[in-house]
Image (tube, rainbow, N blue to C red):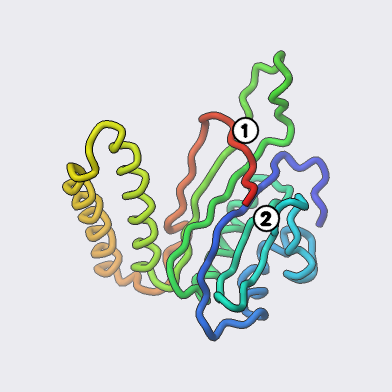
Amino acid sequence: MTRYNAPFEIHVHGDVPLRDDVVFSQIQDALKPLWHYAGARSLAAAAESAYEDEPGIRFDATAHVLQMCWTVPGDEDFRQVIEEACMGLNEIASAGAPLEVSFYDTEYDEEDGSSEEDARDDFMMCFVGPTPAAIMQVQRDLLVQDVVHIMERHFDAAELGDVVVAIDKLFTERFDALVNSMQLGRPPRGFGGASGHGGPRKPRHLH
């Protein structure tokens, strides 16, 4: 269904490596929550982004990578939709991958100096992968990159080895907890999601 006057423009961005045996019909099934949300009857019909300068949703058959740089109008209910899509992608992914989901407030006017309300922009990271270990690996790598980037403002990279070891220990403990609880199938609902509120309004991705 078309969403008129939707409170958000929602941008999904990321590249997901897929198994070599995956075909387009499987991708369409995995992403059905997204194209159904967009009001389309197929992935092909919804693959174009709301913005012409974004490539939308594409399958690189040579590299076997699903590429997403796609904007759709919507509401907070999109969080459940992207979660369901991630569950589908888990079934066809060959490795862990992050998806960035940005919510841009369509009613906020940066040039309106009289507005006393902040933009309701929001951001969340979703992670997909064939196994919990693959998902945790990409989570771990992103966290290490972020932490090292921040701490390198104050310390040399060579001094941060203990910090990386501590991060690895935390993820090892989390994975061990999953193993012990017998949750070795697909990640639990909501697994790996992270959201952040506040901060300056960020520009829409143009990749």
Q: Residue at x 56, y 71 (%)?
A: 65
Task: State the count of labels.
Answer: 2
Reading the image, the residue beneath label 1 is 120
Using the image, determine if residue 58 lies above or below residue 206.
below
Q: Residues within 10 Å of mark 2 (few under 14, many from 20)?
A: many
The x and y percentages for residue 84 are 58, 63
Q: Residue at x 55, y 58 (%)?
A: 14
> Given the current orientation, which residue lies at the most extreme bottom position?
21
The x and y percentages for residue 98 are 48, 58
The x and y percentages for residue 52 are 77, 52
In front: label 2 or label 1: 2
Q: Residue at x 35, y 61 (%)?
A: 136
The numbered mark, 2 or 1, whose residue comes first in the sequence reads 2
In the rendered structure, the answer to whether residue 21 lies left or right of residue 139 reads right
In the rendered structure, the answer to whether residue 118 lies left or right of residue 186 reads right
In the rendered structure, the answer to whether residue 169 lies left or right of residue 188 reads left
Using the image, determine if residue 75 lies above or below residue 154.
below
Reading the image, the residue beneath label 2 is 70
Q: From the viewer's side, name the closer residue of 55 and 111.
A: 55
Q: Residues within 10 Å of mark 1 (few under 14, many from 20)?
A: some
Using the image, determine if residue 199 lies above or below residue 82.
above
- The disc at residue 155 is none
Q: Residue at x 70, y 15 (%)?
A: 113
Q: From the viewer's side, name the closer residue of 196 and 49.
A: 49
- Name the image quarter holding residue 8: top right
In the rendered structure, the answer to whether residue 33 lies left or right of residue 142 reads right
- Name the image quarter holding residue 60: bottom right
Q: Secondary structure at mark 2?
A: strand
The x and y percentages for residue 77 are 64, 50
Q: Secondary structure at mark 1?
A: loop
- Quadrant where the N terminus is found in the figure: bottom right
Say which amino acid is labelled 1: Arg
